[in-house]
Image (tube, grey):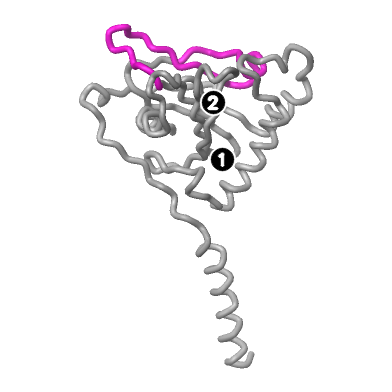
Amino acid sequence: MNKNLIIIFIAIILSGILLIYGNQKEIEVVKFEPEKTDTNTHIIQIPETGFSIEVKKQYVLEKSGYWDGNTIPAYGFKQISKKDYIKPPYLNRIVFLNEETLKDWVKNCTGECLEYPDGGPSPETELDLYYKQKDLFNRNDFNSDNTKQFNGRNWFVSNESCIGDSCEYRIYSTFIGDTQIIVSVEGWPTEAFSNSTADYEFSFFKIN
């Protein structure tokens, strides 16, 4: 091949790389200086999923039927100590999704299946979001406006309000293989809920 053509070919490739990555924003790495009372954590094994999580010692998990009865692994965070009770915002729920379980949910969802507390989510919406976020995650296509990094892992971040704006959720979503992990932090507008206070509480969460 002509030397000049090789140079042009390389230049085109480099231009394409710069065009793709040059427009991407850097993901915000979230770090907080923990308060002394927040430094104690423990690990919880979740055999049903093959994962383990690390959270503040005040939290334990209990099975949740919010997502398609018991067919989708979903757990609520429960605080076991009134003395060390964590005021809002606090960890609310963790859900483990994959394509198969979501398709089954869409197929089997009729009647009461759609009548969830606080008006959501619908199976079709969650399946669409799974495909969209998985594609972005696999392509490493992140936007700093809706993605943050906690403890070395990238998370999609969004906010949702309950019906009547009686509570607020900050939703964190990531992927490990084909499994989508969704964690929600709950608070109330009257309890100084903010993105920053929710992110602080979530910053103690780790998954392996």
Q: Is residue 75 magenta?
A: yes
Q: Quadrant of residue 130?
A: top right
110 or 61: nearer the viewer = 110
206 or 173: nearer the viewer = 173
Give the number of callouts: 2
Q: Quadrant of residue 74?
A: top right
Q: Which residues are magenta?
A: 61-89
Distance in Å between CA atoms under marks 2 and 1: 12 Å
> Hey, what amino acid is under mark 2?
Thr
Which residue has dot 2 on it? 49
> Hey, what amino acid is under mark 1?
Gly
The answer to which of marks 2 and 1 sits earlier in the sequence is 2
Q: Position of residue 18 (x, y in %)?
A: 52, 69
Q: Is residue 25 left or right of residue 163?
A: left
Is 174 drawn above or below residue 89 in the view shown?
below
Q: Position of residue 177 (x, y in %)?
A: 56, 40
Q: Quadrant of residue 90?
A: top left
Number of the label disc, if any, that sits on residue 147: none
Q: Position of residue 184 (x, y in %)?
A: 49, 26
Q: Is residue 174 left or right of residue 103?
A: left
Number of the label disc, if any, that sits on residue 177: 1
Please name the residue shown 68% across and 27% down the image.
Answer: 101
